[in-house]
Image (cartoon, rainbow, N blue to C red):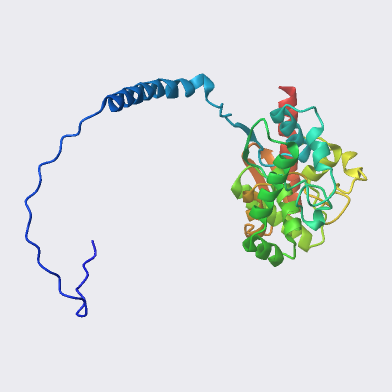
Amino acid sequence: MTYRQSSPYAPPRRSRRPSLPRPPRRARLTRRGRLALLLGAVVAVAAAVTVPLLLLPGDEPAVEKPRALLVPEGWRSGQVYAAVDRALGLPEGTARKAAAVPGAAVLPLPAEAGGNPEGYLFPATYPVVAATSPEGLLRYMVETAGKRFGTERIAAGARAYGMSVYQAVIAASIVQAEADSPEDMAKVARVVHNRLARGMALQMDSTLNYALGRSTVDTTLEDTKSASPYNTYERKGLPPTPIGNPGEQAVDAVIRPADGDWLYFVTVAPGDTRFTAEYALHQENVAEFNANRRAERAG
């Protein structure tokens, strides 16, 4: 309650003689009143029974539990499309067709991508429900990649090595395919930068595998003669597009590579990747790798 001070211009109030309180009158219901009260009680009981019946579990609207679609780091776009089709119960090739629809209104890709979403189908776990469309899901993947790769930190890191963000994603896709650990990623990224700086061909098996639509550690001399623009044995510089969809660790490795003068590397055995700047030593490591491969096939 707000206290208000009396105005000096208000007429004085006359004091009243206090009156004794009257005893309360006992309410009496008429016959019609008693009947109305009885009917009200009946209605209340009926309502109490009706509400639970309306809210029976069988009558509640079903809430669909989302299913999880996992897109691992390094998957190629073809693998992502196939997984989307399976997750949404769609005919094979549906997601690929959805991705091929021209126009940034469908997939907000950078201009350098030329409409190709490779590299921008961001690896993550995505919830899907019955109403999820392939167009909407692919668009969300690309939007997620745009947010993760579109930071000033990544842009500045790419510029430091004379790259655009898109080129950094291309390099990251190679790093993702070639390395098995964050430590090796940083070293592979340094090899990429060192070879580009010297005008050397990258000579990466991963880009050749992408060109040939396969995944193997065995590369033949005939393979290296491929006319594909992804053949980095024959063509210098980065391939025209990413060769898979890299994660943030691979991108970080490209903009913050390890320090070293390495120009060569080979994984001699699982967990044993050797980096060197000496070609003769690299040849020895390759010979050991080949010996291990022969032993595996013989066994």
Image vertical order of residue 187 relative to residue 88, above or below: below
Please state if 33 lies on the left or on the right of 273 as rendered.
left
Closer to the camera in the image, 272 or 60? 60
Can residue 266 be seen here? The reply is no
Name the quadrant containing residue 13: bottom left
Can residue 144 be seen here? The reply is yes
Which residue is located at x 86 percent, y 38 percent? 212
Q: Residue placed farthest to the bottom in the image?
A: 9
Which residue is located at x 69 percent, y 35 percent? 132
The N terminus sits in image quarter: bottom left
Image vertical order of residue 156 relative to residue 103, above or below: below
Image vertical order of residue 27 relative to residue 254, above or below: above
Closer to the camera in the image, 216 or 119? 119
Which residue is located at x 73 percent, y 48 percent? 120
Closer to the camera in the image, 262 or 234? 234
* Count of all numbered marks drawn on residues in the image: 0
Which residue is located at x 65 percent, y 44 percent? 273
- Residue 10: x %, y % from top left: 21, 76
The C terminus sits in image quarter: top right
- Residue 53: x %, y % from top left: 46, 20
Please state if 115 lies on the left or on the right of 52 as rendered.
right
- Residue 253: x %, y % from top left: 64, 54
Closer to the camera in the image, 123 or 142? 142
